[in-house]
Image (cartoon, rainbow, N blue to C red):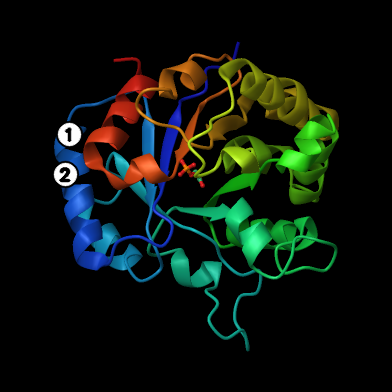
Amino acid sequence: MVQRKPLVAGNWKMHYDPTEGVALVRELRRRLVGLAGVEVAVFPSFVTLPAVAAALPPRGPIAVGAQTCHWERQGAFTGEVSPWMLRNLCEWVILGHSERRQQCGGAGQGGYESDERINRRVHAALAAGLRVILCVGEPLTVRERGETGDFVAAQVVVGLQGLAPAEVANRLVIAYEPIWAIGSGEAANGTSANWVAGLVIRAAVASRWGRTAAERLRVLYGGSVSQSNAAEFLVQPEIDGALVGGASLQADAFAAIVKAAAGC
Ligand code: PGA
């Protein structure tokens, strides 16, 4: 069986200016000294990212990423950031986060955060040398209709279209974040998240990109992960870490989740 190293990612969303962000990562570093067996990454805003990256040693235990990027290398896209601008600053980028899918121009066909456009962002980010956390997850209405499997599988298949199996296995992570669980305090339960991670996401990847890629791909759970419920998700065999929003804003809570992922 393939051993997948857990990843705990902290999505800071629109919180913390450079001074606050640097203070948080300094405190995190202090709390995570000597920790092994887990990867950690934080995702500040574009404004805060350079200061946070500069405050951390390159290739150190805490990596840095951006919260989105554009699909073009450059051009007339006011307010946007190209992955080629990010590549010397950080290692990762989150793409397809549900808050962007919902708030930035519509998720439907042709929308700014449609699966097709997210797929273009994924290709651009990988071409620029970044690693990607691709977010997928169903809204409550889809869940209530019992259509979570088909909905999430389609997001995966379109989001990864055109990628080589090695890119899926090595350069990319999928975060399963049921939309109703994000920021709501109402997390999914471990068993149902494990089902989506394994029998929906990994199965969709296996059918298109092969079993080897599917077995190597890391799948995270996200949505109201806290230090008190993290273990319920992290013990699941198909779940390889967490994408944490609110609880990543406090060093003690985030460090506790990282330690749970490392098994200590
Ligand atoms: P939450 O956010 O942990 O605050 O629910 C998760 C996310 O949006 O990635």
Q: Is residue 179 left or right of residue 163?
A: left
| Quadrant in which the N terminus appears | top right
Which quadrant of the view contains residue 101?
A: bottom right
Q: Is residue 129 left or right of residue 214?
A: left
Mark 1 nearby-residue class (10 Å; few <14, some 14–19, many ≥20): some
Residue type, numbered disc 1: Arg
Which quadrant of the view contains residue 115?
A: bottom right
Say if 243 sits above or below 104 in the image: above
Residue type, numbered disc 2: Glu
Say if 35 sits above or below 191 in the image: below
The residue lying furthest to the top in this view is 1
Tag on residue 3? none
| Quadrant in which the C terminus appears | top left
Return the residue nearer the eye: 98 or 170.
98
- Which residue is painted at 57% across and 86% down in the image? 78
In the rendering, at what x and y percent does residue 177 appear? 60, 39
Q: Is residue 134 left or right of residue 40?
A: right
Pointers 2 and 1 in contact (C-beta within 8 Å): yes
Which residue lies under the disc numbered 2? Answer: 27
Say if 230 sits above or below 72 in the image: above
In the rendering, at what x and y percent does residue 114 appear? 76, 60
- Which residue is painted at 55% across and 72% down in the image? 82
User: Would residue 209 be visible to someone looking at this image?
Assistant: no
Which residue lies under the disc numbered 1? Answer: 31
Say whether mark 2 is within 8 Å of ligand 1: no
Q: Tag count in the figure?
A: 2
Which quadrant of the view contains residue 201?
A: top right
User: Would residue 19 be visible to someone looking at this image?
Assistant: yes
Asked which secondary structure carries label 1, the reply is helix
